[in-house]
Amino acid sequence: MKIQILGSAAGGGFPQWNCNCDNCKGLRNGTLKAKARTQSSIAVSLNGNDWILFNASPDIRTQLESFRPLQPKQGKRDTGIAAIVLMDSQIDHTTGLLMLREGCPHPVYCTDMVKQDLSTGFPVFTMLGHWNGGLVWNQIPSHDTYNEFQVAEVPGITLTAVPLSSSAPPYSPHRNDPHPGDNIGMLLRDDATGRSLFYAPGLGRIEEHLRPVMEQADCLLVDGTLWREDEMIHAGVGDKLGVHMGHLPQSGEQGMVAYLDTLSHPRKVLIHINNTNPILIEDSPERAVLTEHGIEVAFDGMSIEL
Ligand SMILES: [Zn+2]
Ligand SMILES: [Zn+2]
């Protein structure tokens, strides 16, 4: 199974267009040892030709231009994107759908909750209905703890959707009334080799039912948004804590690093990194802590082969 990191930053990207935090400023001024990053998205394939796109980032145009296997290969109009899977209905994970309108129809796999948000508060399903068949919805089941399904366009991978407790976006009609399926994590297993990836770019807390999934996966690609719980306040760019953003910080006794330490089997990679996070600076003490704990930081253009 081939996994391509198209974008590794959280919402806003790195640098964020209107952000003057130490990281964004330092990257622009060339005074930090760090790489620019686009908003998070990955693509997964078995044969290298037909890819499942996980989330459609606002930066999708740049991401497609930077990865040859997703570009046209035959005929006058073509794409390597065989199907699209959405993990939630957040702007930084779904706005890219609008940029793909010239290639409609597209098969889109998401939960009924995400479909509802994207047909009401942010109605991309409705809007794109005006473009050659638009987005063709395939339901991701989310009523059980572990929901197995297949993406028909890319056979040979068994996907398991795992509901994660978190809030729907501000424009969701059920913003203050959380449902299973508002946000999911995903286990992807290559049927031929048995090798598996667990992908969860938004992980607010590590619930009990995640343990067996994270233990069995060969690679974890999980929430790397924040280093510290009060990072937005500390950086002077916001007033929200990690807990309110649905992102578990890396540091602290209950943090992601401490949790990942309890898992010996999988390769551990952080993705969806906010521009305020010190792990973006390659020679920072925080980055050194990750290295010491065997944890990698995803970057745009990174390839993982399982
Ligand atoms: Zn996000
Ligand atoms: Zn910033």
Image (cartoon, helix red, strand yellow):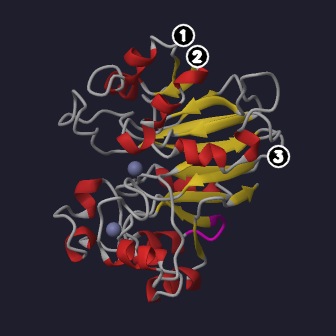
Residue at the image point whose x is 57% and y is 86% from the top = 292
Residue at the image point whose x is 36% and y is 40% from the top = 91
Q: What is the C-alpha distance between the residues marked 3 and 1? A: 36 Å
Where is residue 303 shown, x and y percent of the image?
A: 71, 58
User: Ligand 1 closer than 8 Å to the CB at disc 3?
Assistant: no
From the viewer's perspective, is 264 left or right of 57?
right
Compare residues 223 and 231 and report the one nearer the observer. 231
The residue type indicated by label 2 comes to Pro
In this view, 227 is above or below 32: above
Label annotation for residue 105: 2
The residue type indicated by label 1 comes to Gly
Where is residue 215 shown, x and y percent of the image?
A: 59, 59
Residue at the image point whose x is 38% and y is 76% from the top = 23
- Element marked by disc 2: loop
Instruction: Kindly identify which residue carries mark 3.
Output: 193
Q: What is the C-alpha distance between the residues marked 2 and 3? A: 32 Å
In this view, 193 is above or below 227: above
Residue at the image point whose x is 30% and y is 33% from the top = 179
Compare residues 106 and 32 and report the one nearer the observer. 32
Mark 2 in CB contact with mark 1 (< 8 angstroms)? yes
The residue type indicated by label 3 comes to Thr
Mark 2 and mark 1 lie on one chain; the one further toward the N terminus is: 2
Tell me which corner region of the image, top left, top right, bottom left or bottom right, holds residue 43: top right
Instruction: Kindly identify which residue carries mark 1.
Output: 133
Q: Nearer the viewer, mark 3 or mark 1?
A: 1
The quadrant of the rendered image in which ligand 2 is seen is bottom left
Q: Which residues are magenta?
A: 263-267
Where is residue 30 shown, x and y percent of the image?
A: 48, 80
User: Ligand 1 closer than 8 Å to the CB at disc 2?
Assistant: no
From the viewer's perspective, is 42 left or right of 142?
right
